């Protein structure tokens, strides 16, 4: 029998019937009859093509990606919510509706350049080629696609190859050195860096934080959308309690620049506190520290403190399990206990801008000394210091 539309009591349409012996009973996921009819016709056309040319002719990349994730594959880089506007992004979105048979090396390379235009090949390998190939191999195993030898960007080998310089932020540092660096910053970016060094969060996650995401009483931060696309909970180090308490009471976006504007959320990279980082390097004489240094440092220090790898991964958002999803908003004592094993520097914990971040936010550091200037009203009354 041909495919027909049926309307459920909840208003959604579903498709049922069969085409050339292939049965169908599935939802269109829409209450719009016109859209549902187009979905019915497209499904019927696919089934006719499948009956003639086989299932390899009709399976789309996003269907294969959904199956891969349902089978236990990691969702990171495949589909996630962009923190800035909560829209879906990732490989599954880029190739949505595209049939596997229509994807070749050129399409994969174009996707990598479009999704990540200003990054190194190592990043494209990790965020595009690796998950894409994993999904493709899953499709091959299900006989939805033919085996393919995909080419990745590769670093040149041999004695003539020039080793790339170590990228800033890829190595951990000590908390003493981190404090020396951060004490050479203005209060606003110093608060950002302090939060990163005592949570292990990714910068993009921190910049997206709002007051409603934080429970100071429970020492718990809930990330509604992390880089992996999955919500997760982050424990709060005891040193951060005064800072977060003041920021939560102010409300809205937690971290703001000296002009009281929220830091922008950029999907294709950082740079929100680039000037502050450069200034701190010049004043402190310390090179090689960037926002991502904090994440690597937290990971290293937790290992040195004897924290179980599973707990460490939960804190950093590497481990996404059914249990971690279930308890996203529930404070976990084991994680809070673990994060408090990070070293505490007395001068850092007692910094005035850390204890009263809202009061000190609009002040800037002097170029000549590691002291904070007094706030000076600008002609526009913005409160920005000179």
Image: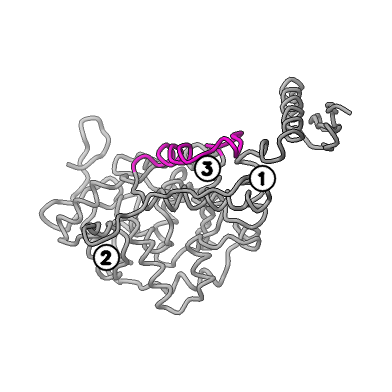
Q: Quadrant of residue 37?
A: top right
Q: Is residue 85 above or below residue 135?
A: above
The residue shown at (30%, 51%) is 189
Q: Are marks 3 and 1 in contact (CB under 8 Å)?
A: no
The tag on residue 179 is: 2
Q: CA distance from mark 3 to mark 1?
A: 18 Å
Q: In front: mark 3 or mark 1?
A: 1
Q: Residue pushed farthest top?
A: 34
User: Is tag 2's residue or tag 3's residue first in the polypeptide sequence?
Assistant: 3
Assign the magenta stretch its main secondary structure.
Answer: helix
Q: CA distance from mark 2 to mark 1?
A: 54 Å
Mark 2 Cα shell of 10 Å, populated few (<14), some (14-19), many (≥20): some
The tag on residue 173 is: none
Depth check: 2 or 326 in front? 2
**Which residues make up the magenta segment?**
93-118
Magenta-span inclusion, residue 110? yes
User: Is tag 3's residue or tag 1's residue first in the polypeptide sequence?
Assistant: 3
The residue shown at (52%, 42%) is 91
User: Is tag 2's residue or tag 1's residue first in the polypeptide sequence?
Assistant: 1
Look at mark 1 in the image and give the residue it sits on: 144
Q: Is residue 238 above or below residue 277?
A: below
Q: Is residue 177 visible?
A: yes
The residue shown at (54%, 54%) is 222
Q: Position of residue 148 (x, y in %)?
A: 54, 48
Depth check: 210 or 284 in front? 284
Q: Position of residue 15 (x, y in %)?
A: 81, 31
Look at mark 3 in the image and give the residue it sits on: 91
Depth check: 157 or 307 in front? 157
Left or right, residue 293 beside residue 248: left
Left or right, residue 367 beside residue 124: left
């Amino acid at each position: 029998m041909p495919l027909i539309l049926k309307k459920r009591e909840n208003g959604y349409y579903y498709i049922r019937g069969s085409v050339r012996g292939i049965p169908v009973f599935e939802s269109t996921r829409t209450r719009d009859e016109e859209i549902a009819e187009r979905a019915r016709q497209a499904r019927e056309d696919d089934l006719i093509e499948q009956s003639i040319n086989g299932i390899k002719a009709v399976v789309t990349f996003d269907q294969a990606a959904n199956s891969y994730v349902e089978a236990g594959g990691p969702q990171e880089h495949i589909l996630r919510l962009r923190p800035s506007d909560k829209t879906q992004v990732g490989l599954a979105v880029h190739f949505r509706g595209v049939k596997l048979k229509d994807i070749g090396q050129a399409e994969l390379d174009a996707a990598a350049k479009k999704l990540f235009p200003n990054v190194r090949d190592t990043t494209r390998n990790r965020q595009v080629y690796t998950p894409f190939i994993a999904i493709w191999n899953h499709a091959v195993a299900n006989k939805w696609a033919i085996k393919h030898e995909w080419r990745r960007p590769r670093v040149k080998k041999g004695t003539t190859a020039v080793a790339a310089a170590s990228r800033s932020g890829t190595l951990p540092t000590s908390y003493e050195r981190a404090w020396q660096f951060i004490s050479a910053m203005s209060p606003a970016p110093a608060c950002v860096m302090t939060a990163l060094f005592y949570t292990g969060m990714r910068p993009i996650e921190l910049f997206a934080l709002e007051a409603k995401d934080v429970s100071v009483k429970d020492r718990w931060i809930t990330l509604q959308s992390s880089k992996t696309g999955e919500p997760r909970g982050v424990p709060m180090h005891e040193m951060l309690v005064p800072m977060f308490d003041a920021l939560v009471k102010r409300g809205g976006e937690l971290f703001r620049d000296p002009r009281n504007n929220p830091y922008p959320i950029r999907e294709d990279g950082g740079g929100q506190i680039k000037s502050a980082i450069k200034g701190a390097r010049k004043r402190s004489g310390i090179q090689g520290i960037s926002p991502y240094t904090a994440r690597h440092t937290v990971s290293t220090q937790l290992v040195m403190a004897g924290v179980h790898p599973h707990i460490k991964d939960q804190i950093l958002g590497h481990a996404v399990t059914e249990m971690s999803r279930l308890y996203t908003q529930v404070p976990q004592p084991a994680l809070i206990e673990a994060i408090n094993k990070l070293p505490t520097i007395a001068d850092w914990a007692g910094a005035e801008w850390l204890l009263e971040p809202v009061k000190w936010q609009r002040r800037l550091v002097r170029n000549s000394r590691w002291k904070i200037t007094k706030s000076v009203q600008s002609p526009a009354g913005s409160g920005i210091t000179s």
